[in-house]
């Protein structure tokens, strides 16, 4: 237990005074000797409890000072809090120990005002000083004993707030900064951006906001793991931070999305230079999984004051431009404008309508026959998705299918298409209608879903169908971008006898050498070649080569978009196997197809005329 002669002496003096007063009062009718002993014992217990209390509070530092602010008491908690031992502190002035320089005059005056005028020192949060010079945050409360005597004593009770302050700083960091990259997060960025916009208004200058989104970052995470993805984000943050000016504001908003604000822009040339500077950080390869890999990013640009007055408006509009850039392709840059906003607003509303349409059963399948180029006989049908709202005109597949791709609805829709086509094929088989196969289209996003080919086979089998009844059509771009797992699934279907066709052949990468690597059974020559081949020798030559090589590889060749007699004669001359187009049949509802297959409705074209 800490022992201090000044405090002990004061306590003994108080005890003697109490004892003397009690002794002087021993007269008839006054307190008895037993009463005096009892009071003396109570005083001793109180003294012990007081000392024990002061020494038992590890987080509460207590110091005692005399009239001249010299230390007369210093507990262990004060040593831990301020760094001075009891021996170092005793007899020293308060202001020389723990009071920072700027506060000294005020503390001295406050002590004098209390001693001389009875003006108490209010309890408050303050920062005092450690022996090392470091600041010490405390909540300080003061008690004055013997206040109206010549020997007043002041006791300071200081509660250490270091843990609370540290937690507050950590909370403030978490609220305003991104833990991975140490950059501002969205909340911190919006605060700083609003301040920068206020400065731009004062000085009548512009501001450019660049929204950056790494291309195919999700695939990097999936292929290499989140640790590699995090390293990429940190490296990109360091590059962006290293290229910015002191006035520029940089943030990681979320995931792989970064924003940079450039205040004080003077003109279009200055703006273009800043955008090029952001794009240039992606030019050098990134280290991924031990290898240097070249990556790209899409940029969306919004400007103040033209594209927004507040931080939230500018971020939203730059995000709109960025989303359009991602639709345009890798590494694209798009500047925000009002027509772009209006179009994306229309897309958003249409996406909501599409989700409701799926629930309400507004989607249906039409079927377009594929006809033998030699006999004119209907061989197969292609299932084509249609959206028929109860009010208003039909919505084009070219408009709503990309929306379904982006929103993820394509999986639900694709499952429905497969189920509906299998059910219809089963009904026509049971009705005895002559038909070989129904082909359905599958998108790149559909075939990336885990287990998609197993689900396909299960659906076909569930309806009592086999490989000759249902086929798949994929675009060549989907096949070229397919990974080993997808190609392996397609090879298994191919080995089981399912028909797999390359749709719109010639509109993608268009390398015939790819054909030997893909498990396909048919090529569908795109309608643009069929349309232009009669008058364009180059298109005719490409089409002839496609048909020739397709046949040499044992593939069936289908000519799409045949709309007139001239085109029909051309594809017959080139020995295409099947013809699909308006010359024979438009896409039709299932009821019309059923009557057609039953021989009730003839086609509009004829091979005999």
Image: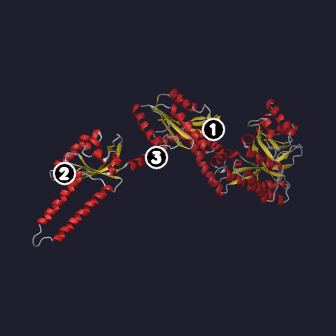
- The number of callouts visible is 3
The residue to which callout 1 is attached is 288
Badge 2 or badge 1: first in the primary sequence = 2
Q: Which mark is residue 384?
A: none
The vertical placement of 245 against 37, above or below, is above
Depth check, mark 1 against mark 3: the one in front is 1
Badge 2 or badge 3: first in the primary sequence = 2
Task: Give the farthest residue toward the top.
Answer: 269
Work out whether residue 59 or residue 370 is closer to the camera in this orientation and state it: 59
Depth check, mark 2 against mark 1: the one in front is 2
The vertical placement of 374 against 420, above or below, is above
In the image, residue 467 lies at what x, y percent?
82, 53
Other residues around mark 2 within 10 Å, as few (<14) / some (14–19) / many (≥20): some
Task: Give the farthest residue toward the bottom.
Answer: 29
Left or right for 211, reference 130: right
Work out whether residue 510 or residue 88 is closer to the camera in this orientation and state it: 88
Separation of residues labelled 2 and 1 (CA atoms) = 72 Å
Other residues around mark 1 within 10 Å, as few (<14) / some (14–19) / many (≥20): some
Separation of residues labelled 1 and 3 (CA atoms) = 30 Å
Badge 1 or badge 3: first in the primary sequence = 3
Quadrant of the snapshot with the C terminus: top right
Question: Is residue 112 visible from the viewing direction of this image?
Answer: yes
Q: Are marks 2 and 3 in contact (CB under 8 Å)?
A: no
Left or right for 218, reference 5: right
The residue to which callout 3 is attached is 175
Give the structural element (helix, strand or loop) at label 2.
loop
In the image, residue 85 lies at what x, y percent?
32, 46
Give the structural element (helix, strand or loop) at label 1.
strand
Work out whether residue 398 or residue 295 is closer to the camera in this orientation and state it: 295
The residue to which callout 2 is attached is 152
């Amino acid at each position: 237990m800490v022992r201090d002669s000044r405090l002990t002496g004061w306590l003994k003096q108080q005890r003697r005074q109490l004892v003397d007063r009690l002794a002087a009062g021993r007269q008839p009718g006054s307190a008895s000797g037993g009463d005096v002993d009892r009071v003396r014992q109570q005083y001793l217990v109180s003294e012990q409890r007081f000392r024990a209390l002061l020494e038992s509070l590890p987080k509460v530092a207590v110091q005692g000072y005399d009239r001249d602010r010299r230390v007369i008491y210093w507990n262990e908690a004060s040593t831990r809090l301020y760094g001075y031992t009891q021996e170092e502190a005793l007899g020293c002035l308060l202001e020389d120990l723990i009071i920072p320089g700027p506060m000294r005059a005020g503390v001295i005056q406050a002590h004098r005002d209390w001693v001389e005028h009875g003006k108490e020192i209010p309890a408050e949060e303050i920062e005092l000083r450690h022996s090392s010079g470091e600041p010490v945050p405390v909540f300080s409360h003061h008690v004055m004993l013997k206040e109206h005597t010549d020997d007043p004593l002041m006791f300071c009770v200081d509660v250490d707030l270091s843990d609370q302050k540290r937690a507050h700083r950590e909370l403030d960091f978490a609220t305003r900064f991104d833990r991975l990259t140490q950059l501002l997060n969205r909340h911190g960025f919006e605060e700083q951006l609003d301040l920068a916009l206020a400065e731009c208004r004062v000085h009548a200058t512009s501001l450019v906001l660049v929204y950056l989104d790494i291309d195919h970052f999700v695939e990097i995470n999936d292929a290499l793991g989140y640790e590699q993805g995090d390293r990429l984000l940190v490296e990109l943050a360091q590059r962006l931070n290293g290229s910015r000016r002191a006035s520029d504001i940089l943030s990681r908003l979320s995931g792989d999305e970064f924003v940079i604000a450039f205040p004080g822009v003077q003109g279009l040339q200055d703006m273009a230079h800043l955008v090029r500077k952001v794009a240039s950080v992606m030019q050098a390869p990134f280290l991924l999984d031990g290898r240097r890999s070249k990556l790209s990013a899409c940029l969306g640009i919004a400007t103040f004051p033209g594209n927004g007055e507040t931080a939230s408006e500018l971020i939203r509009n730059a995000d709109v431009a960025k989303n359009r850039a991602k639709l345009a392709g890798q590494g694209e840059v798009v500047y925000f404008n009002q027509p772009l906003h209006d179009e994306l607003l229309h897309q958003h509303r249409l996406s909501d309508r599409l989700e409701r349409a799926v629930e309400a059963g507004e989607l249906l399948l039409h079927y377009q026959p594929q006809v033998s180029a030699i006999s004119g006989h209907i061989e197969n049908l292609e299932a084509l998705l249609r959206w028929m709202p109860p009010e208003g005109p039909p919505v084009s597949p070219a408009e709503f299918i990309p929306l379904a791709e982006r929103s993820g609805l394509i999986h639900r829709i694709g499952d429905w298409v497969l189920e509906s086509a299998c059910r219809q094929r089963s009904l026509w088989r049971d009705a005895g209608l002559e038909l070989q196969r129904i082909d359905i289209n599958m998108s790149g996003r559909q075939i990336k879903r885990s287990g998609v080919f197993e689900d396909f086979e299960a659906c076909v089998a569930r309806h009592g169908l086999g490989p000759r009844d249902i086929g798949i059509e994929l675009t060549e771009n989907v096949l070229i971008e397919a990974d080993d797992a997808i190609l392996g699934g397609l090879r298994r279907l191919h080995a089981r006898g399912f028909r797999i066709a390359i749709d719109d052949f010639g509109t993608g990468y268009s390398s015939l050498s790819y054909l030997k690597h893909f498990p396909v059974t048919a090529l569908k020559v795109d309608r643009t070649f069929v349309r232009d081949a009669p008058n364009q020798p180059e298109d005719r030559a490409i089409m002839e080569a496609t048909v020739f090589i397709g046949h040499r590889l044992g593939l069936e060749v289908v000519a799409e978009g045949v709309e007139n007699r001239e085109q029909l004669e051309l594809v017959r001359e080139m020995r295409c196997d099947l013809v699909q187009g308006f010359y024979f049949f438009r896409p039709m509802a299932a009821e019309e197809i059923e009557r057609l297959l039953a021989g009730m409705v003839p086609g509009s074209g004829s091979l005999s005329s």
